[in-house]
Image (spheres, rainbow, N blue to C red):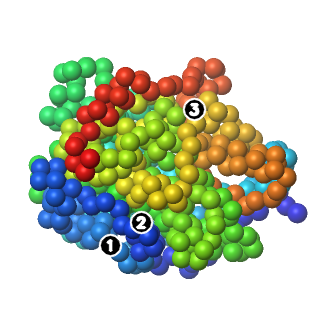
Amino acid sequence: MSDTVKYVLDESRIPRAWYNIMADLPSPPPPVLHPGTLQPIGPDDLAPLFPMSLIAQEVATEREIGIPDPVRDVYRQWRPSPLYRARRLERALDTPARIYYKYEGVSPAGSHKPNTAVAQAFYNKEEGVKRITTETGAGQWGSSLAFAGTLFGIEIEVYMVRVSYDQKPYRRAMMEAWGARCTPSPSPETAAGRAILAARPDHPGSLGIAISEAVEMAVQRDDTKYALGSVLNHVLLHQTIIGIEAMEQLALAGDYPDIVVGCTGGGSNFAGIAFPFIGANLREGKTTRIVAVEPAACPSLTRGRYAYDFGDTAHLTPLTKMHTLGSVFTPPGFHAGGLRYHGMAPLVSHVKELGLIEARAYQQIGCFEAGLEFARAEGILPAPEANHAVKGAIDEALACKRDGVSRAILFNLCGHGHFDMQAYVDFKAGKLVDQDYDEAELAMALAGLPSAGA
């Protein structure tokens, strides 16, 4: 049997609807609150930031949300993405496990992020939006929105976390190649950025700060909206195309996962691969274990508090109940920049509270070791974020070896590492270290959580 086993769907099989987990949850998540009144927000409260079509998706409860034909037309460039059986990795690990990975690195931007970037750009274009502001950590989201913006003729302004802006110049170059403007955050362009820089001129930045800057800039012009690359319900909804396709591809393989693994930062790629399988667990009595893997240096699910908090550092956003390290928490500058967010998506946090998923945290050196082991077996070099899912899958496969059982393991390889080579250079040179967050800073950040819902 060939070592390379690839399950490919014809483009006619691109899903026609996204899956909305809200329809199957045993209880709804807590409401989003207005930061001033502490009352549940309405559509008008979000209208300055998002088009009404996305606001409607944010609160939708129907199980399927149709994918517009213009969005499916763009998806056709890389979707359905391939599913692989990792036979060479199985042999290298000497495990009886059956390991599958859904590979999202085939998109033009090299990650899963265009799944929602294209959709968000389309809905903004439909509403006449001329300009979108956003934030980005490692740059996967910023480059994906830049790609989508150029397709739909929308100006894109990206605030990139400064430590990643310096670490990943080729992500920045990619955004600029697609016509976006990329600014290191914190920046002197906004009141939020100036306040941070006044207190600490060398601040490395955080996703919370970059969100503040992008939101501040969005509300200043009527032709401008804001876009978020993770966390929000509609973003997670768009990513479920990953899991929907994976279900059909696994059916081609004659298999079904015992375990699904995804890396988690804000929660979008994890939700994309996991939510359809959680839905099957809830509706059909399936028993798939769902494992969320996060960085030990920014452990919102395993160390954060489940509480109402702001999504940004300057407190410009509504309050959502989520696992959070505190909106002013600044994680250390480890290389998986896309996972350096202080909070977790409210829906991911909610399913964790319901006991529907497990969570674990890993240090970066172990994740890079796993990524290289995967690359030497399967030939694909993962992004630093995806390495967390790779390590989670490898650990589960080794557990199968110890237990002497064959289980099917599915993970989302959410992006390639071609623009993260400096991280691998540093790893090979012994320059990477496992980084721990500052316990005193975490305690301070958690002590400053809003009293809403306490």
Q: Earlier in the sequence, mark 3 or mark 1?
A: 1
Report the Cα–Cα distance between label 2 and label 1. Answer: 10 Å
- Residue 371's x, y, as percent? 66, 40
Q: Earlier in the sequence, mark 3 or mark 2?
A: 2
- Residue 176's x, y, as percent? 36, 43
Q: Quadrant of residue 119?
A: bottom left
For the N terminus, give its image quadrant. bottom right
- Residue 36's x, y, as percent? 12, 50
Q: Circle 3 sits on which residue?
A: 363
Report the Cα–Cα distance between label 3 and label 2. Answer: 29 Å
Q: Are marks 2 and 1 in contact (CB under 8 Å)?
A: yes
Q: Which label was assigned to residue 352?
A: none
Q: Which label was assigned to residue 237?
A: 2
Residue 41 visible, this angle: yes
Query: Is 71 left, or right, of 155 in this rendering?
Result: right
Closer to the camera in the image, 250 or 97: 97
- Seen in the picture, residue 80 relative to 230 is either above or below; the reply is below
Residue at 63 percent across and 71 percent down: it is: 286
- Seen in the picture, residue 2 relative to 165 is either above or below; the reply is below
Q: Circle 1 sits on which residue?
A: 60
